[in-house]
Structure formats: structure tokens, C-alpha cells
Amino acid sequence: MARARPLSEIVDEAYRLADAVRNDLRHPRPDVIRWVNKGLAELWDMLLERNGRDWSHSSATIPLTGATEYPLPATFYKLIAIRKTPDGGNLIPFAPAQEAELRDSSTTTGAPLFYQLRANELVVLPVGSYGEIHLDFIANFVDLALETDTFDGIAGFEDYGALFAAKRMAMRDESPELMAMLDAEMGRLAGRVRAMTAVRDVGEPKRVKDVRGSRSHARRRWWAS
């Protein structure tokens, strides 16, 4: 069962770990909240490191209006797949060096064929494409703002945010012994996170490794054409 804890509890735990309970004059609560969010963002990257789609899978539909640039969702982090609707055909990524050629040769309207991620936008070609495209993506971490906002720590992993903030308080207090203890706890928890999240679905079949590589597949497709 998931373990969602409010920001208020994680912040209070940070004060306790830093031996700084009721010491919010030295360590104002807004500072500790900011540090907790930095720690949770670092934890988020660890969760997504190997099997991101197991922990964060979002989707969005973008209506095409004939333009070539469209803003990505505000929470977009990494792309899983992009396809046309309703037929479901995947779009093909293109390299920056191909853009001029694709734009010059793609002057008719119709379904989108190619895409490129660029900063906070999605480029779609050919020019004048209409219809809709569907994005499957991994969402980024969004800072907890309200004390009632919760973080799903899965199995107590949210303690990493408390430890991170406590270490920052120890740094401010110039307490090297406490810093070393907290750093060791963070290392142990990080190892546990990576070990336990490597494969979330233990019933997932093992993948067969392709030892021949993509060139052999390309040759087979060429001879079959």
C-alpha cells in the first residue's frame, strides 16, 4: 500500500533529525520546506532512474492546428511515446539537420509524420498537419507548496527529503558529526531505493537481448521490401 505523507510531517521529521525542534528562528520553516523539496526532487530522479514509467506515467492530447510548434505539458519530463490519433501510428523523430529538408519537402496538409523535442516545445512536421497527437510521458517532480500537500513515499522513501533538509540544517549549524551521520543515512536509503525500485513488477517477463543488433534487422527489412 502506498504511503502518502503530508509536507508538514516530513518537515517536522527534518527538524527532529537535525535536533532542531522548536528552533525555527535559527532554521525558518520556509527554508526547511525548500530543502525538503530539493531532497524529494533528488529522490524523484532516483525513482525514475531505471524504470521511470513504473512510477510516473502521464498522458496528454495535443490538437494540431496546422502550426509546427506546440507547447509541451507543464509537467513534461521525459517522453515515452508519441502517436497519431485515432489510428495510433507512431511519429518518427528527426534530427535538427533534417529540419530544413523536411520543411521544404513537406508542404501538403495531412497527418503528422515527424517530431522533435526542443526545450519546452514539440515540433511537428509536415507543415500544415491537422488532427491530434497523443503523448505518453514521465512527469517531473512538482514542489509541495502547502503543508497539507502529500508525497507518495511508496515504502517510506519520503524520509530522504527529511534527511536532506536535516543535513542542510546541520551544515548551517556547522555540526560535522551530525552531517556525517545524516549523510550515511541518506546513502543507505538511496541504496535501498535503487535496489527496491529496479523492477516494480516482479512478474514481468525477462527481455531477450538482441545480439545481432539493428543492422541485421535493417538488412532483413531491405531484402523483404
Image (cartoon, rainbow, N blue to C red):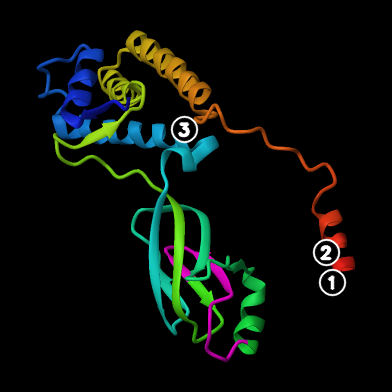
Label 1 residue SS: loop
Q: Looking at the image, which residue is at 55% across and 36% down?
A: 50
Nearest the viewer among 153 and 159 is: 153
Callouts 2 and 1 close, C-beta under 8 Å: yes
Residue 110 marker: none
**Circle 3: residue type:** Met
Mark 2 — residue?
A: 221
Query: Up-down: is 174 above or below 206?
Result: above
Q: Looking at the image, which residue is at 85% across and 46% down?
A: 212
**Circle 2: residue type:** Arg
Of the residues tagged 3 and 2, which is closer to the observer?
2
Q: What residue occupies the far bottom of the structure in this picture?
A: 108
Task: Give the residues in magenta.
Answer: 106-122
Query: Up-down: is 218 above or below 25?
Result: below
| Residue 60 image point, x, y percent | 38, 61
Query: Up-down: is 56 above or below 98?
Result: above
| Residue 26 image point, x, y percent | 14, 23
Q: How many marks?
A: 3
Label 2 residue SS: helix
Mark 1 — residue?
A: 225
Placement of the C terminus among the 4 image quadrants: bottom right
**Circle 1: residue type:** Ser
Q: Looking at the image, which residue is at 50% across and 55% down?
A: 79
Q: Judge left or right: residue 63 versus residue 16.
A: right
Res 132 visible: yes
Callouts 1 and 3 close, C-beta under 8 Å: no
Mark 3 — residue?
A: 46
Q: Residues within 10 Å of mark 1 (few under 14, many from 20)?
A: few
Q: Quadrant of residue 97?
A: bottom right
* Cα gap from disc 2 to disc 1, whole angstroms: 6 Å
Q: Earlier in the sequence, mark 1 or mark 3?
A: 3
